Image (cartoon, rainbow, N blue to C red):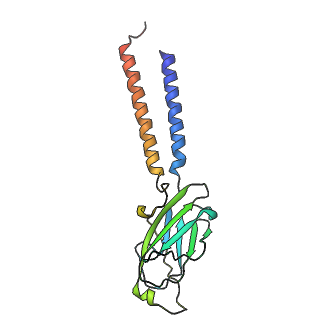
Amino acid sequence: MRQRTRVLVSALLALLVVVLALAAPAAAHTDLAGTSPREGTVVDRLLREVRLSFDEPLSSSLVQVAVIAPDGTDVVSGEPTVDGGSVVASLRRLEGPGRYRVAYRVVAADGHPETGGFRFTLSEAAASTRSSRATAAVLPTGSGSQSSDLAASPASGASGPWLAVSVALAGLLVSVVLARFTALRRTRPDAP
């Protein structure tokens, strides 16, 4: 009986190690640390760029940013520039006031993708600014937020549920094995 118990416990521990090892990489992902303009901000000056700051370095060839105007057009001019965890997307002249939507998809240097987005509003005053000397609105980066309705990939935030499911399954497996072990022990008389 003792040999069988050792084998069972060893197998259970090995399974638990495998489940946790597979779940650990899924838990690592890049987080949006700040944006300029910030989510929900009303921008009252001419905006020439959007900045995104992430908590990890990014793969520069795998960054996508779209800034969607109220009329549905993407107003990003050219490819975004990446420097470590910072992304800058230059914008064409924003003519119309209204709510703009920023959507992004980035891949961290370690290969984990992250998608999300946020919104800001361009005021009437900013839209009517015709001065060629107008400056870009640069807001300090703060805690950004991600909007699930803008996510373009199922990878967004997927690490949390997979980790929770893995841990729950491991816990269930441990419970079943321990219950079975306890039941077997109660039904068999101890050897002299």
| Quadrant of the rendered image containing residue 92 | bottom right
Viewed as shown, does residue 48 lie left or right of 146?
right
Q: Residue at x 49, y 18 (%)?
A: 4
The answer to whether residue 143 is seen in the rendering is: no
| Relative vertical location of residue 115 with respect to residue 11 in this rendering, above or below | below
| Quadrant of the rendered image containing residue 62 | bottom right
| Relative vertical location of residue 82 with respect to residue 28 in this rendering, above or below | below
| Relative vertical location of residue 100 with respect to residue 129 in this rendering, above or below | above
How many numbered discs, if any?
Answer: 0
Residue 45: x, y in percent?
46, 85
Viewer-proximal residue among 2 and 50: 50
The answer to whether residue 45 is seen in the rendering is: yes
Q: Residue at x 48, y 55 (%)?
A: 154
The C terminus is located in which quarter?
Answer: top left
Residue 120: x, y in percent?
42, 75
Viewer-proximal residue among 154 and 109: 154
Residue most extreme to the top: 192
| Relative vertical location of residue 57 with respect to residue 168 in this rendering, above or below | below
Residue 165: x, y in percent?
43, 43
Residue 1: x, y in percent?
47, 15
Q: Residue at x 38, y 25 (%)?
A: 179
Viewer-proximal residue among 94 and 43: 94
